[in-house]
């Protein structure tokens, strides 16, 4: 008896079965990795451009005897360095594993970016907040010495609101991007 099981398998298979083209998957994975690399490159350039500015500004304030303001600006620079390190550590691309199917690699890449975007408050905004708060406190205290606390706080309100509004906008935009990637992940699950 030489009955082959293949006709049974093909008869049981759905006629509308869809298979993922490995070349299309590799192209999609490559395009997503390029998108991540471009974003991270822009972020690194922006961070590296800032560092000399924060250093020079801190040196200026320290030279002028404004110790608290100078140290707060240094703290902002340290925050930028931490953000740059986190960008690579938490939001960089991941290399495919040789034994890993393309779809599994793409899912890992999406998941990593989704997690990074959802947690942007902690690893991207968080390191900057101590320096920014210290800067506002130092400048406001300096202004309060000559104008009084009420005037100093009124003067600080608009820049403070603008700065933390910008932080809030970055958080919201990253959450929206995380939702987009979550939808991509859900679509990927239907292919598996």
Image (tube, rainbow, N blue to C red):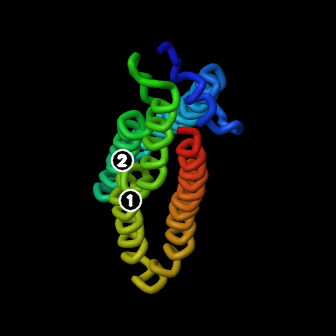
Task: Check contact, mark 1 vs mark 2: CB within 8 A.
Answer: yes
Question: Residue at 39% of width from left, 19% of height from top?
Answer: 99
Residue 73 in the image: x percent, y percent? 38, 51
- Dot label at residue 129: 1
- Secondary structure of the residue carrying tag 1 is helix
Tell which of 124 and 157 is nearer to you: 124
Residue 23 appears in view = yes
Residue 53 in the image: x percent, y percent? 48, 40
Tell which of 140 and 23 is nearer to you: 23
Question: Residue at 52% of width from left, 18% of height from top?
Answer: 3
Question: Residue at 61% of width from left, 28% of height from top?
Answer: 10
Say left or right for 178 vs 68. right
- Secondary structure of the residue carrying tag 2 is helix
Say left or right for 178 vs 84. right
Residue 182 in the image: x percent, y percent? 54, 52
- Looking at the image, residue 179 lies above or below residue 90: below
Tell which of 5 and 16 is nearer to you: 5
- Looking at the image, residue 147 lies above or below residue 95: below
Q: Calculate the distance from the C-alpha at mark 1 to the C-alpha at mark 2.
A: 8 Å
Q: Which residue is mark 2?
A: 79
Question: Residue at 32% of width from left, 50% of height from top?
Answer: 75
Number of other residues with Cα within 10 Å of mark 2, as a class: few under 14, some 14 to 19, many 20 or more: many
- Dot label at residue 67: none
Residue 112 in the image: x percent, y percent? 43, 41
Tell which of 170 and 161 is nearer to you: 170
Hey, which quadrant is residue 137 in on the image? bottom left
For marks 1 and 2, the one nearer the N-term is 2
């Amino acid at each position: 008896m030489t009955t082959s099981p293949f006709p049974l398998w093909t008869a049981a298979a759905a006629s509308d079965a869809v298979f993922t083209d490995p070349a299309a998957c590799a192209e999609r994975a490559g395009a997503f990795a390029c998108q991540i690399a471009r974003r991270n490159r822009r972020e690194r350039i922006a961070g590296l451009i800032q560092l000399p500015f924060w250093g020079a500004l801190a040196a200026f304030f320290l030279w002028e005897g404004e110790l608290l303001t100078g140290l707060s600006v240094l703290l902002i620079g340290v925050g930028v360095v931490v953000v740059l390190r986190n960008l690579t550590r938490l939001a960089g691309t991941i290399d495919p594993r040789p034994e890993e199917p393309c779809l599994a690699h793409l899912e890992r890449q999406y998941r990593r970016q989704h997690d990074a975007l959802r947690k942007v408050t902690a690893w991207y905004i968080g390191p900057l907040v101590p320096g920014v708060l210290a800067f506002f406190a130092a400048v406001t205290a300096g202004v309060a010495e000559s104008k009084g606390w009420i005037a100093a706080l009124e003067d600080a309100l608009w820049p403070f609101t603008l700065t933390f509004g910008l932080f809030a906008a970055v958080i919201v935009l990253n959450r929206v991007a995380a939702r987009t990637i979550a939808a991509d992940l859900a679509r990927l699950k239907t292919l598996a």
